[in-house]
Amino acid sequence: MEEKYNPQNVEEKWQRIWEDGKKFKATEDKGRKKYYLLEMFPYPSGRIHMGHVRNYSIGDVLARFKRMRGFNVLHPMGWDAFGMPAENAAIQNKSHPAKWTYENIAYMRGQLKKMGLSYDWDREIATCDLDYYKWEQQIFLQMFKEGLAYKKTSFVNWCPKCQTVLANEQVEDGCCWRCDSGVEQKELDQWFFRITKYAEELLENTEKLPGWPERVLTMQRNWIGKSYGCEIDFPVEGRQAAIKVFTTRQDTLYGATFMSLAPEHPLAMELTVDENRDKVVEFIEKVKRTDKLTRTAEDFEKEGVFTGSYCINPVTKRRMPVYLANFVLTDYGTGAVMAVPTHDQRDFEFARKYDLPLQVVIRPEDESPDPAIMTEAFTSEGIMVNSGQFDGLKSSDAKEKIADYLEKKGIGGKTVNFRLRDWGISRQRYWGNPIPIIYCEVCGVVPVPESDLPVVLPKDAIFSGEGGNPLAKISSFVNVPCPLCGMMARRETDTMDTFVESSWYFLRYCCPDFAAGPLHKPETEYWMPVDQYIGGIEHAVLHLLYARFFTKVLRDLGYVDVDEPFANLLTQGMVIKDGAKMSKSKGNVVDPNALIDAYGADTARLFSLFAAPPEKDLDWSDQGVDGSFRFLNRIWKLVFESAPFIVDAGAVKPESLTEDGKKLRRTVHKTIRKVTEDIEERFHFNTAIAAVMELVNSINSFEPKNLPSSAPVLKEAVESVILLLAPFVPHVSEELWESLGHGKGIEADGWPAYDPAAAIEDELLVVVQVNGKLRVKVTVPASASEDEVKSAALADDKVKSFTEDKAVKKIIYVPGKLVNIVVG
RNA sequence: GCGAGAGUGGCGGAACUGGCAGACGCACUGGACUUAGGAUCCAGCGGGCAACCGUGGGGGUUCAACUCCCCCCUCUCGCACCA
């Protein structure tokens, strides 16, 4: 053992031992309890950043901890490798997305290995590998067969110059982020996954995920958005047609004075009378030119246009003018809103703007609002008025009664509505998984036969950045014979959303080499569900909901038999520096490479775990890193200096311990308990590390170290420090463990055992309060009775000075902790 | 606007079911060792001379509140105006 801690030597040595010995290879073993630990896999953007360091350090603590506890741990890593940045880089560098991606993967894999993360690299997956995405095509075909993948038209943000679809984040002030042209709404034929079929189960199962943070579940529930309401038919005047409306406020039905349709509503043009046609067309065009982002912005002005038609309120028989309104969304409900300006704020503003009638139907307990002078809608519950037979009821009761009434009259009825919409997966991009579909003029939409899979992404595309999807310009790819009739047909050139790959990669990790299908049941059955999933909070809804959806689909297709993929979820906070998220534009990025070169991976890991609990944001501090490095040096020195005394020492004999020895041993076992609980139950690695630091401080002040009688307890203390630190700083721990004569490696020797007998206190420190204020602390024997503790408290001189000449009213006693003397 | 979360020393953070506010670390101050120190070791470190005051602000419940309840303020994150 060297006198000085040299992280580079130590880390290289142990990383080689781990890799050569395949120490982290996971093999199914029914005789052992399995633990599947997973961190969200990275996008191969080029280099790892501090967020990765943090995420993977957190995961590695748990992986190593569980292995030391005897679990059969699966801890895999891979790459979410399809996506837009690769394509952009190809355009910029006149290169190919595959080249860029695989180079990045190679570099980043090296970086992760230098972190000493305990992955089973034999299970590595890159989603752009044919061996991965071809199975996804098979799953797609099965979903198509089941009606879970289907095609429909929908509106997208479209840049006319780039000839490409834009995500909301690529639209800046209504213009394309790249060429600055005005963005339009374009109707495109797109592929969708029918996630709404699983809306009910996805919602219900949120109750069965106790290991998920409550706030993530809340966000998912809100996203799915189940609401109970009514569908109501409003007959159109002078026609057979009716406008169907969804509402959760059927109690306000008698106050509906006009109708608002989404501009995309199928009846919009049909109901427009000739003399209003120009204005309506102009309005629809204007809404089409507005991108989704702007349209949903807070300060977006509510505007509309009158179609010239009327519908009839089915209960009041009032004529209701039919408007198109820019704030009504075609995707939610039925795309039509019965407008109740007195009791809905948006309708109120709209009515004021276009001078539409108001009718109050709910009033507060003690006043009667006057529509003429109202300044805002009354949206709370109240008493029904102007509502026929329902007058006088509480509005909450009227909801139920009106729903029943509508059902009886055949005008409408109760219904359940979900906010959740089907998942659009079509992307007009090259670097993604091709959708295995062929369009034949005769046979129509033809799925590629499974025997013809895979549809290989062709290499020979040109990345000019102009004219849309490069795939569509490869004629050998596009022009293929129809699998049914053999006539020339056209291949689908859309690729799948990259969220599809990340929706099932955790299943493929169970059987990454299986060559006969996407998944192999014996392995998925053994490993699934993921016992602990770790990743950023930004995935609280989309990725985590899609992965849950896919798991249910694959269950119903017979591939897996779990309902939920992730038993426990830990969402970690961002890495912050100088008050902002680390980013190139802010110039506050700390490069992991530089950190590891200067201090070693153990220090990088230790600091990122010690500076904050995982779920909170972490404030980066270069000085804090120094502190972590110093701590590892102190440990090194402690082991180096105590080794001569303890290497040959025997086991502790509790009966022959000195007072100081007993005290040190008590600290050791209390620390073992605390660290175990902090890791296992709370993921509070920062306090676990703090506890070990305290133990180290106790060992350093323990004297004498050089006597034979001290050796056993000193040995136990020092070895406990090493073992407790092993999940956090594995390299240095292995080295120190070996230097004390242990040859098998730390994980083989296991997690230290907590001995309750060794942690028992002889004496207790009891806090004495007078009227709730701390006055003194008294030490009593651990065996002292309640009366003895109270007497000891009252006998104290300082306490006496606060209690004399006052009557003791009451004494509160919290066993082993506190006495509060109430005087008056 | 809706939804979710957070406010504790100079800083990061502790305080787990209401029971010692500030563990642990950083920074800082003083000292030791020293040719030297950005190394190491020792000591101190919320404010106030003190009584006391202190967990964003104001009320409340309680013997006791960072913790529970009500009102307000500030900050962060997410979003698909959710009828």
Image (cartoon, coloured by chain):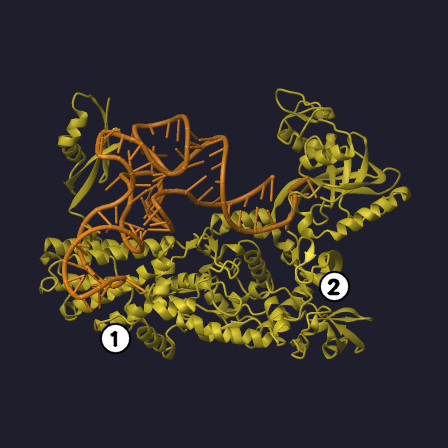
Q: Report how far apart the C-alphas of labels 1 and 2 lie in the structure.
A: 67 Å
Q: Which chain is yellow?
A: A
Say what secondary structure mark 2 lies in. Answer: loop
Say what secondary structure mark 1 lies in. Answer: loop
Which circle's residue, 1 or 2, is located before the other in the chain? 2
**Which amino acid type is marked by label 2?**
Lys
Give the letter of the chain under mark 1. Answer: A
Q: Which mark is residue A71?
A: none
Few, some or many residues within 10 Å of mark 1 (<14, 14–19, 20+):
few
Which percent across, then down, holds residue A71? 37, 65
**Looking at the image, which residue is at 58% across and 52% down?**
A201
> Relative to residue A432, is residue A573 depicted above or below?
above
The quadrant of the rendering that contains the N terminus of chain A is bottom left
Q: Which mark is residue A743?
A: 1
Q: Which chain is orange?
A: B
Q: Which mark is residue A161?
A: 2
**Which amino acid type is marked by label 1?**
Gly
The quadrant of the rendering that contains the C terminus of chain A is top left
Relative depth, front residue between A27 and A302: A302
Which percent across, then down, holds residue A209? 49, 52
Few, some or many residues within 10 Å of mark 2 (<14, 14–19, 20+):
some
